Image (tube, grey):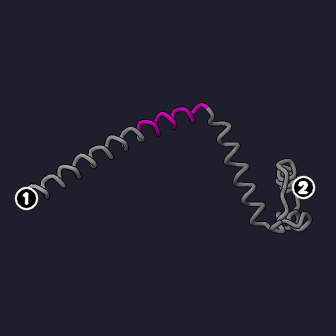
């Protein structure tokens, strides 16, 4: 064991909620739970990102379509590089002989 405490998702949410609603400072709440404030802010960031992602669930498909187009373009460019490299090698062989 590495000595670190494993926090359950519900416990993390409860601590985030306690900081928001109790009126206590983040430092006080973290001290009560023996939690580093950096860890608290990391959880807060993860929570906000997950919330944003859940609100944007319809836009995720558009991003994946765009990613697919970019992936196809990358593959096309890779094949062009391979073709040019082969032509370059052929020219070197021809001129070198």
Query: Where, quadrant-wise, is the N terminus in this rendering?
Result: bottom right
Residue 70 position, x and y percent, is: 41, 41
Residue 91 position, x and y percent, is: 12, 54
Which mark is drawn over residue 22? 2
85 vs 23, left or right, is left
Q: Nearer the viewer, residue 96 or 55?
A: 96
51 vs 24, left or right, is left
Residue lying at 42% horizontally and 41% vertically, measured from the top left:
71
Say above or below: 67 vs 49: above
Residue 36 position, x and y percent, is: 80, 67
Q: Quick check: is 61 in the magenta stretch? A: yes
49 vs 33, left or right, is left
Dominant secondary structure of the magenta stretch? helix
Say above or below: 62 vs 94: above
Q: Quadrant of residue 4?
A: bottom right
Secondary structure category for the residue under label 2: loop
Magenta residues, start to end? 58-69
Of all residues shown, which one is farthest toward the right?
32
Residue lying at 86% horizontally and 55% vertically, measured from the top left:
15
Which mark is drawn over residue 20? none
Q: Residues within 10 Å of mark 2 (few under 14, many from 20)?
A: few
Q: Nearer the viewer, residue 90 or 26?
A: 90
Q: Residues within 10 Å of mark 1 (few under 14, many from 20)?
A: few
Which mark is drawn over residue 95? 1
Residue lying at 85% horizontally and 62% vertically, measured from the top left:
5
């Amino acid at each position: 064991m590495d000595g670190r405490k494993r926090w359950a998702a519900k416990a993390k949410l409860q601590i985030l909620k306690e900081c928001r609603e109790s009126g206590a400072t983040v430092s006080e709440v973290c001290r009560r739970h023996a939690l580093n404030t950096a860890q608290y802010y990391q959880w807060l960031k993860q929570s906000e990102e997950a919330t944003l992602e859940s609100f944007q669930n319809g836009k995720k498909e558009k991003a994946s379509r765009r990613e697919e187009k970019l992936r196809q373009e990358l593959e096309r460019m890779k094949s062009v590089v391979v073709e040019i490299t082969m032509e370059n090698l052929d020219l070197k062989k021809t001129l070198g002989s």
